[in-house]
Amino acid sequence: MDKDDISKLIESLSRLTTRQRKAIESTIMAFGVPRFYWCSPISDLITQDVLENLGDRLISHHAGSRQALSKDRFEFALEKSLNDSGIPATLVKSRTNRGHDLTINGTPVSLKTEAAAAIRENMIHVSKWMELGRGPWELPLLRDLFLEHMRSYERIFTFRCLSADPERVCYELVEIPKALMLESANCILEVSENSRQNPKPGYGYVRDSEGQLKYSLYFDGGSERKLQIKHLRKDLCIVHATWAFGSAAL
């Protein structure tokens, strides 16, 4: 920033109210807290520019909030961070689109978020992958709806808030391999017969060759009639980046 830019900035600040100047001062001070940003050397999405761009947006958000970044704010922040870093990205126009959320370099991408208070670092939970509609409630048909849904995007990412504690805010971006999700075509389906829900919920279990659970589909028959992904092992996914900041970040 040259002297002219600094002069313009000072002039702009002089026109603000005391309250507005204090708000800006608070944000500026927030950028001075200890921080640790990391991106995987094999990531084809998160460059150093994207890493720092998105990290600065996270710091700015938490300068005025103790709540985790919401899904819509994350989508907007990621789109802006990618474009500002020279990577073309475009959010879908309809917020109710049943397919992908963002197009990155021509690739349709589905975005998820996780920020539960009881989040488990090594297990991923997607509380709402998709709505299941008002059609027949039969687990094989619902599983096939999930497989059909995935035809509209090529990659899947989940943005996880591991901690929103002001002393150490921590986020990570994890890619859920689509091939892993497609393994659900052969999942073991089981209706929860003892449930009082109507229709009765059910599970689709995906296991490895040794019988260990990889993840489960949960067909939630509640008021939203939605599909959840439970107990997804993070070691089967790809961590692209992490962001930590606050007085205890290092």
Image (cartoon, rainbow, N blue to C red):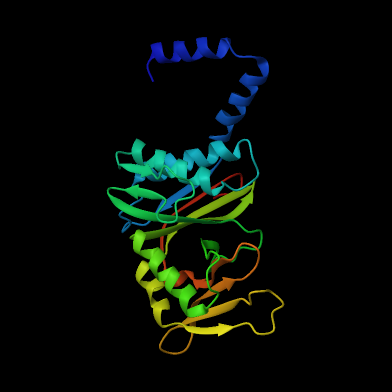
Q: Nearer the viewer, residue 64 or 36?
A: 64
The quadrant holding residue 19 is top right
- Horizontal side of 118 relative to 90 (left or right) equals right
Residue farthest to the bottom, as pictured: 210
Q: Quadrant of the N terminus?
A: top left
Residue at point 46% right, 46% down? Answer: 75
Q: Is residue 8 above or below residue 215?
A: above
Residue 234 coordinates in the image, percent (x, y): 47, 69
* Residue at x 44%, y 69% (from the top left corner): 145
Where is residue 44? Give x, y as percent.
30, 54
Q: Nearer the viewer, residue 17 or 73?
A: 73
Give percent across and percent down for residue 87.
30, 42
> Could you say which quadrant of the image residue 196 lies in?
bottom right
Q: Quadrant of residue 28?
A: top right
Residue 190: image location, x then y, percent: 55, 84
> Which residue is drawn at the image coordinates 35% and 59% (left, top)?
152
Front one among 202 and 56? 202
Which residue in the rendered view is the most extreme toward the right?
196
Question: Could you say which is closer to the camera, residue 60 or residue 175?
Answer: 175
User: Eyeballing the image, is 71 above or below 179?
Assistant: above
Q: How many callouts does the rendering have?
A: 0
48 relative to 243 in the view: left or right: left
Q: Residue furthest left?
A: 106
Write the residue at 59% across / 40% down: 62
